[in-house]
Image (cartoon, rainbow, N blue to C red):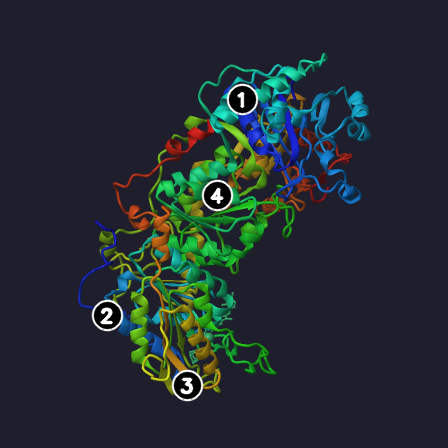
């Protein structure tokens, strides 16, 4: 977007240390005063396969991945499959170079490891020709040789950092500081030597790129580099959650891992169990016994939770589940983002079952909304699901440290104490009336096992006020209406939270709506569109259930047309909006993408412009679906 | 002070306290073996010194799952096959609560088989009663995982081609630390075994033979039965895994030859899961549930403990 931004890609195979190098690099840039945002692209493989991490950095706020990138550090895939097989797999060891040609901007920089990709191979894939065409600056350096000379081969990433420091005039002091924090002194020193040698080697190059490292004054306040998963886990802990049960599945595993590593320190319990049916059921059992509990999974695992989810609703057992979307259907593309589980999460489980569903749009919202999820679940005794995706899960971004300065919440919600139980309604046989007809905000306070005088029956069957199974028609309707009636009050509560995010001018001709992880990318596109003379505002919606009908109505009424941007093939959020607010159908069109790569801001700009001009999208991986009746 | 004063309360207990005023009479078919489970369980409670407010009974779905309706205590009548994961988490959340899980043979050995294996493996301190009537009762008589080979039902019209599951052996192999079998026709032995199972500090599995006169007419009434501890014909050490395994194999085979062998088959005092987990430092010493009711509880904050490493 501007010359002052760096979008750096480090590319190699899974297992090449790309994640840790990019994390350290992003943190160093953050400490230097820049804003940073990362984007990961990796295959479902432990070793090898084309992987990259992008770090976008600028002196002004950065809140999304950018358009393409401008510096490539290509390490070569050291775990590539047998070159004899290249007819089938392509030349894997070259992929860190070749797969990244398309997105490199004009005037961009390529540093590649000559130790893995030799001159001849580079020529074969047309590197020089392409460089000529695009004005790229290309720097072959034997990074492995440098690394091996002073330490071990894995340190070649840092040789690359050294080369960059010379070419882009990048001050490595923050980076070296971090190296000192993560390694013992001996290894840290070896790494520093590798960096210096890389920097020295690059002195040989006469020609330097135009691009230089952006610089900034220090941030006004201390920053933390966090992922969406960090924010969800920390929000859960601060919400008083002390029990998690789960079964690993990408990308949900991340939240499960962070919780498992920290719960013991927080006096809580984490359980890795036999399957996701058990995982959800354990969370219910812990909650039933009075503990704030959560579970979660990704698409396939969440499908297994369908029946316990319904049980939670029927028994009015509070529980928080998180659903981390990845590209489906079935096993799909396990490490690629998609937003195609919305309908799955909204509607799974039998009967007129229901639940609260929230979809945070960025890291801060992940923290805020998981806390809201716990509040709603425990106050209203209803399952609450936080839905997010592989993109938000792994993106690192800097946030003010002070953002996390919050009070924890150990309140177990609408539960009685033993003193209150004594006063509460009981059946004349002594059983506590757990499911009263007469309720405040349709909530009937619960008791938990071990409390004197609180015994009752929780059952997935329809039940009467004491929890005993009942098929009495009058009771049935009263109980159903109580369970469903909560939504009116929850909607009011959510309105007070203000989970929807409005962006752009108050008055605008056009609207763009989105949900979940693309929110801030859409907002960046909206800035550009308005700068280019369009009149556009945006709405990022988080409340999926109960749907914020009034707020969306006001937004849609205020614009002539609205483009709904989401990362799936069938326009699920647009469908939800049409289900809730049918009369706006003719105003809504969709911009969709489902190839496994998230939108770039420029793509949304392009999609918007072609849509208002009534043109066809050109050569693109997006899909435009016009309004019904167009 | 504990927020759960029912736990550990020391007082006279009458088994009639466990009869709910709301549904004092069970609706099982006349002659159903399930009545005996209910009776034996009520009888065991004063013996183990537990009151209705400190017991959590979790059941699955089936005729057997109705136990919750006829037994007065805290109850969680879950979904088909899932009583164990609900029950064991409640135990972790508040170890002072006496947790009992119960369900049918279809529920526990079929649809919930994975949970059975893993709950036994983990050796949670709880009791699991399986109403083994060798049939799907509630859904009207289909072949179950314990139905004998050749058993005919509406869904296996030519007779089951499958060998039945071996529930005792399965429990042993999975890691249960107490394994017994009793029968509805022997209420006193049943009450004793249930009391022992409840008092056992680990996962106690009781395979309870419950005749279903409605759908399993050709099944035995589980008489005559033999208590292997009472009989001179059986000599084995219940604490010896290998001997126990051999005994179970014989007992399981004999059932299908018409000989009903009951009793305790295995007992081992390996530490329960709660103890093991506390030993790793991954479970608090104080019952987790207490914290939520303690107004002075200190809640750790992410800001204090975790943010620094991100800066
Ligand atoms: C997921 C699911 N599948 C099927 C059923 C229907 N169903 C209810 S009880 C039952 C089997 C009951 O057999 P068993 O567990 O042996 O219990 P019993 O009735 O014999 O005590 C079945 C299949 C159900 N409730 N839920
Ligand atoms: S159907 Fe069988 S198991 Fe069910 S209540 Fe009747 S006799 Fe008992
Ligand atoms: Mg049965």
Q: Which of marks 2 and 4 is in front?
A: 4
In which quadrant of the rendered view does residue A561 lie? Answer: top right
The quadrant where ligand 2 appears is bottom left
The one nearer the camera, A471 or A176, is A176
Query: Taking the image as drawn, is residue A169 in sight?
Result: yes
Q: Which of marks 1 and 2 is in front?
A: 1
Residue pointed to by mark 4 = A257
Left or right: A98, with A416 as reference point? right
Label 4 packing within 10 angstroms: few (<14), some (14-19), many (20+): some
> Mark 1 touching mark 2, by CB under 8 A?
no
Q: Which residue lies furthest to the top in this view?
A: A206
In which quadrant of the rendered view does residue A90 lie? Answer: top right
The one nearer the camera, B301 or A480, is B301
Left or right: A57, with A493 as reference point? right
Chain of the residue where label 4 is placed in the rendered structure = A
Residue pointed to by mark 2 = B46
The one nearer the camera, A360 or A263, is A263
Instruction: Decide: is B117 above or below A591.
Output: below
Residue pointed to by mark 1 = A175
Chain of the residue where label 2 is placed in the rendered structure = B
Left or right: B93, with B294 as reference point? right
Separation of marks 3 and 4 at Cα, in angstroms: 51 Å
């Amino acid at each position: 977007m501007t010359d002052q931004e760096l979008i750096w890609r480090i590319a190699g195979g899974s297992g090449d240390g790309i994640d840790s190098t990019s994390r350290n690099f992003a943190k160093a840039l953050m400490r230097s005063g820049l804003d940073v945002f990362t984007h990961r692209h990796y295959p479902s493989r432990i070793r090898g396969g084309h992987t990259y991490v992008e770090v976008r950095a600028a002196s002004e706020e950065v809140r999304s991945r950018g358009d393409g990138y401008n510096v490539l550090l290509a390490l070569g895939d050291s775990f590539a499959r047998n070159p004899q097989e290249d007819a089938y797999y392509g030349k894997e060891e070259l992929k860190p170079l070749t797969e990244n040609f398309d997105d490199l901007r004009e005037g961009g920089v390529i540093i590649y490891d000559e130790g893995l990709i030799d001159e001849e191979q580079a020529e074969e894939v047309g590197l020089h020709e392409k460089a000529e065409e695009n004005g790229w600056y290309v720097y072959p350096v034997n990074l492995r040789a440098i690394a091996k000379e002073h330490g071990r081969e894995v340190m070649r990433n840092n040789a690359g950092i050294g080369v960059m420091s010379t070419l882009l005039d990048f001050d490595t002091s923050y980076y070296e500081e971090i190296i000192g924090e993560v390694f013992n002194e001996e290894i840290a020193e070896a790494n520093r030597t590798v960096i210096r040698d890389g920097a020295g080697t690059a002195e040989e190059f006469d020609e330097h790129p135009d691009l230089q490292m952006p610089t900034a004054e220090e941030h006004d306040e201390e920053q933390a580099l966090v992922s969406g998963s960090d924010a969800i886990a920390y929000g859960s802990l601060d919400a008083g959650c002390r029990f998690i049960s789960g079964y690993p599945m990408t990308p949900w595993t991340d939240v499960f891992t962070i919780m498992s590593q920290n719960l013991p320190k927080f006096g809580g319990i984490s359980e890795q169990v036999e399957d996701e049916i058990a995982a959800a059921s354990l969370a219910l059992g812990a909650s039933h016994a009075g503990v704030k509990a959560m579970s979660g999974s990704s698409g396939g695992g969440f499908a297994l939770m369908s029946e316990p989810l319904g049980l939670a609703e029927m028994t009015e057992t509070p529980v928080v589940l998180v659903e981390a979307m990845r590209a489906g259907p079935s096993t799909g593309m396990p490490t690629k983002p998609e937003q195609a589980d919305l309908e799955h999460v909204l509607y799974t489980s039998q009967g007129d079952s229901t639940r609260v569903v929230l979809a945070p749009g960025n890291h801060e919202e992940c923290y805020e909304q998981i806390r809201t999820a716990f509040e709603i679940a425990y106050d209203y005794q209803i399952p609450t699901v936080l839905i997010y995706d592989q993109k938000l899960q792994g993106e690192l971004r800097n946030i003010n440290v002070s953002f996390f300065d919050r009070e924890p919440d150990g309140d177990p919600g609408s539960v009685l104490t033993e003193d209150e139980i004594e006063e509460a309604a009981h059946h004349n046989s002594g059983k506590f009336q757990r499911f009263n007809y007469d309720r405040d905000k349709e909530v009937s306070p619960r008791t938990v096992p071990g409390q004197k005088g609180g015994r009752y029956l929780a059952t997935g069957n329809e039940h009467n006020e004491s929890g005993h199974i009942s098929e009495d028609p009058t009771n049935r309707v009263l109980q159903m209406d109580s369970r469903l009636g909560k939504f009116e009050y929850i909607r009011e509560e959510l309105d007070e939270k203000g989970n929807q995010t409005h962006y752009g001018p108050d008055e605008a001709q056009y609207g763009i709506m989105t949900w979940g992880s693309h929110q801030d990318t859409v907002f960046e596109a909206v800035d550009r569109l308005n700068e280019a003379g369009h009149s556009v505002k945006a709405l990022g919606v988080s409340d999926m259930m109960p749907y914020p009908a009034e707020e969306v109505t006001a937004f849609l009424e205020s614009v002539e047309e609205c483009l709904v941007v989401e990362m799936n093939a069938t326009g699920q959020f647009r469908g939800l909006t049409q289900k809730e607010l049918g009369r706006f159908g003719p105003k809504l069109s969709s911009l969709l993408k489902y190839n496994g790569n998230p939108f770039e801001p420029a793509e949304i700009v392009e999609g918007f412009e072609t849509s208002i001009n009534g043109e066809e999208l050109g050569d693109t991986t997006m899909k435009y679906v016009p309004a019904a009746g167009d | 002070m504990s927020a759960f004063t029912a736990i550990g309360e020391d007082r006279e207990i009458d088994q009639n306290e466990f009869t709910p005023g709301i549904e004092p009479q069970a609706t099982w078919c006349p002659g159903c073996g399930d009545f005996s489970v209910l009776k034996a369980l009520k009888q065991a409670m004063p013996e183990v010194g537990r009151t209705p407010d400190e017991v959590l009974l979790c059941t699955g779905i089936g005729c057997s799952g109705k136990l919750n309706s006829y037994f007065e205590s805290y109850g969680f009548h879950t979904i088909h096959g899932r009583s164990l994961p609900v029950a064991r988490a409640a135990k972790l959340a508040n170890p002072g609560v006496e947790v009992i899980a119960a369900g049918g043979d279809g529920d526990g050995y079929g649809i919930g088989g994975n949970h059975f294996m893993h709950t036994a493996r983990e050796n949670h301190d709880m009791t699991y009663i399986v109403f083994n009537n060798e049939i799907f009762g509630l859904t009207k008589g289909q072949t179950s995982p314990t139905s004998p080979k050749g058993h005919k039902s509406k869904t296996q019209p030519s007779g089951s081609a499958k060998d039945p599951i071996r529930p005792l052996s399965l429990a042993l192999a999975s890691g249960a630390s107490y394994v017994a079998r009793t029968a509805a026709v022997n209420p006193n032995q049943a009450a004793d075994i249930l009391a022992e199972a409840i008092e056992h500090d680990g996962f106690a599995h009781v395979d309870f033979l419950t005749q279903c006169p409605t759908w399993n007419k050709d099944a035995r009434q589980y008489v005559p039965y033999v208590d292997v501890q009472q009989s001179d014909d059986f000599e084995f050490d219940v604490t010896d895994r290998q001997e126990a395994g051999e005994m179970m194999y014989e007992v399981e085979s004999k059932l299908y030859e018409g000989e009903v062998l009951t009793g305790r088959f295995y007992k081992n005092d390996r530490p329960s899961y709660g103890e093991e987990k506390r030993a790793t430092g991954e479970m608090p010493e104080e019952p987790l549930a207490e914290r939520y009711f303690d107004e002075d509880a200190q809640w750790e904050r992410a800001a204090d403990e975790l943010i620094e490493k991100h800066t």
